[in-house]
């Protein structure tokens, strides 16, 4: 009799997004019998409505900008139009290939993949239609969905990122409500595609969780790109009529647009799934766990976006792998939010890991040193025509505790930054390592050389 006939698994996972499928794959590698329940498409938000499709749009945006600005370096080109049907087909083809690959991985791992909407039916059982999947461990991985504001109803010309990814034309005028990661990425795409874009953010700066210096640089770059940035501005309402939407703002003239993107964050998908009935504690909809991702109900874990903290796919992967290894008795190290790398893929890109300067000062007082290496001194950045910096934050005579970067393509540098912060390296350790010339990666090396007291292409 197969495991599914017996209804008997080592692990039943509810939700097949980044966190859920990573947990399923690692559990299967460790010899556990696994059921993975997914109501929509394997791969979840990241693959179908998040990371991958947005980055495909951002790549098309980069190509448009390269063509538009080519004449300045002697490559004459004109952007005739943005053909959204072809952009969409390219994006969908990327998603389709990755989806197929992922389906192959799950099926060859021997995971019992169950299609359908599941809900807890007691602390050890997930019901999917008439089927009941019982496991010695349950992993809750139901992810997140776009939020709106009270009184702001999504529909028509008021969209979230889900609808924005399916647009078949470039709007002439867009208001983006929310200057966080999703908001600035869409603002960047639409501007590159030729739209007039206004970003409205209630807080005093864009990307408010990043280092303040990064927010300032992004705002400067956006203004240069003729994106209107309205920070410290409260949204008060939106009305649709005919072909437009009018967005009202506190203490300012209303803004009329063809589209309003609501990008005010994502909330957990946990309601009506039997979590609380099974004894799981929710806090404003999020699942409360300990550092080992245990919910407090014996054998029940939660992973990914439903656990408060950074909503990132690689955090979900790390959670999923951690839980699989914990169940298998390998005693893995907990996933530390402080060393999770973060990349925002707008133009210019932002990459960071660890603490911002403000966070470091809150934690360590005055015993903090910072250094900002301007990309003006970096050959490759000059060649590709980008501006920005690498900022290091270290404890006085201690390790580097935070790295923030802004500039075209800096996301590709976040791997080394993560190793430096994760390994608690001192600037002197990194200063001894070679960085190839001419790469943007050198900027990271140069910043550490300077902080170690031996700057090369920089002033101390
Ligand atoms: C526009 C956008 C861009 C993003 N860009 C990035 C990026 O560049 N990098 C990055 O790291 N992160 C990015 N993210 C965030 C990333 O997508 C999420 O952090 C990640 O998908 C979370 O994974 P998860 O498994 O926790 O949840 P999800 O991916 O949301 O997966 C949850 C799954 O559970 C399923 N499910 C829910 N309820 C049930 C049920 N009752 N029964 C069965 N199945 C159910 C859902 O269908 C879904 O497939 C982006 C998100 C968005 C929206």
Image: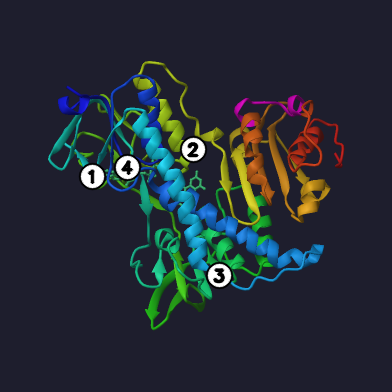
Question: Label 2: which residue?
Answer: 314
Question: Label 4: which residue?
Answer: 142
- Determine if residue 206 is in view: no
- Is there a contact, CB below 8 Å, between mark 4 and mark 2? no
Q: Nearer the viewer, residue 5 or 459?
A: 5
Left or right of 9, for residue 451: right
**Marking on residue 198:** 3
**Is the CB–ligand 1 distance for label 2 below 8 Å?**
yes
Give the prevailing secondary structure in the magenta stretch.
helix
3D distance between C-alphas at marks 4 and 2: 16 Å
Tell me the residue at 34%/69% (across/down): 155
Q: Earlier in the sequence, mark 2 or mark 3?
A: 3
Q: What's the magenta region?
A: 421-430
Q: Does 322 lie within the magenta span?
A: no
Quarter of the image for residue 424 reads top right
- Is there a contact, CB below 8 Å, between mark 1 and mark 3? no
């Amino acid at each position: 009799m197969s495991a599914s006939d017996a209804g008997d698994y080592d692990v039943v996972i509810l939700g097949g997004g980044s966190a859920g499928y990573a947990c399923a794959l690692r559990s299967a590698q460790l010899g556990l019998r696994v059921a993975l329940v997914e109501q929509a498409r394997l791969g979840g938000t990241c693959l179908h409505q998040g990371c991958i499709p947005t980055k495909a749009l951002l790549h098309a945006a980069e190509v448009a900008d390269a063509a538009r600005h080519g004449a300045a370096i002697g490559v004459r080109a004109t952007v005739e139009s943005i053909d959204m049907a072809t952009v969409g087909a390219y994006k969908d083809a990327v998603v389709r290939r990755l989806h197929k690959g992922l389906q192959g991985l799950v099926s060859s791992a021997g995971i019992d993949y169950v299609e359908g909407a599941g809900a807890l039916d007691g602390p050890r059982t997930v019901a999917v239609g008439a089927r009941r999947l019982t496991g010695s461990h349950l992993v809750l991985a139901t992810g997140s969905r776009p939020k709106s504001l009270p009184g702001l109803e999504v529909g028509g010309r008021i969209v979230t990122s889900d609808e924005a990814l399916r647009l078949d034309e470039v709007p002439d005028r867009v208001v983006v409500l929310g200057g966080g990661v999703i908001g600035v990425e869409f603002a960047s795409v639409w501007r590159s595609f030729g739209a007039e874009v206004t970003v409205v953010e209630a807080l005093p700066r864009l990307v408010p969780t990043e280092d303040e210096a990064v927010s300032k640089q992004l705002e400067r770059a956006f203004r240069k790109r003729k994106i209107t940035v309205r920070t410290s501005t409260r949204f008060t309402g939106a009305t649709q009529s005919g072909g437009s939407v009018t967005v009202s703002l506190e203490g300012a003239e209303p803004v009329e647009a063809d589209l309003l993107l609501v990008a005010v964050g994502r909330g957990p998908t946990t309601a009506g799934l039997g979590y609380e009935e099974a004894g799981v504690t929710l806090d404003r909809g999020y699942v409360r766990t300990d550092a080992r991702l245990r919910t407090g109900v014996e054998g029940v874990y939660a992973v990914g976006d439903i656990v408060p903290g950074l909503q990132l796919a690689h955090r979900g992967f790390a959670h999923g792998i951690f839980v699989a290894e914990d169940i298998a008795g390998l005693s893995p190290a907990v996933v530390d939010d402080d060393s999770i790398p973060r990349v925002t893929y707008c133009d210019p890109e932002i990459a960071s890991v660890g603490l911002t300067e403000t966070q470091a000062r809150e934690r360590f007082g005055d015993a903090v040193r910072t250094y900002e290496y301007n990309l003006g001194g970096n050959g490759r950045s000059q060649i590709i025509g980008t501006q920005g910096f690498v900022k290091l934050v270290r404890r006085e005579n201690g390790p580097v505790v935070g790295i923030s970067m802004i500039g075209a393509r800096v996301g590709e540098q976040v791997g080394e930054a993560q190793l430096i912060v994760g390994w608690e390296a001192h600037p002197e350790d990194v200063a001894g390592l070679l960085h190839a010339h001419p790469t943007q990666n050198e900027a990271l090396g140069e910043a550490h050389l300077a902080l170690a007291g031996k700057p090369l292409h920089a002033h101390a």
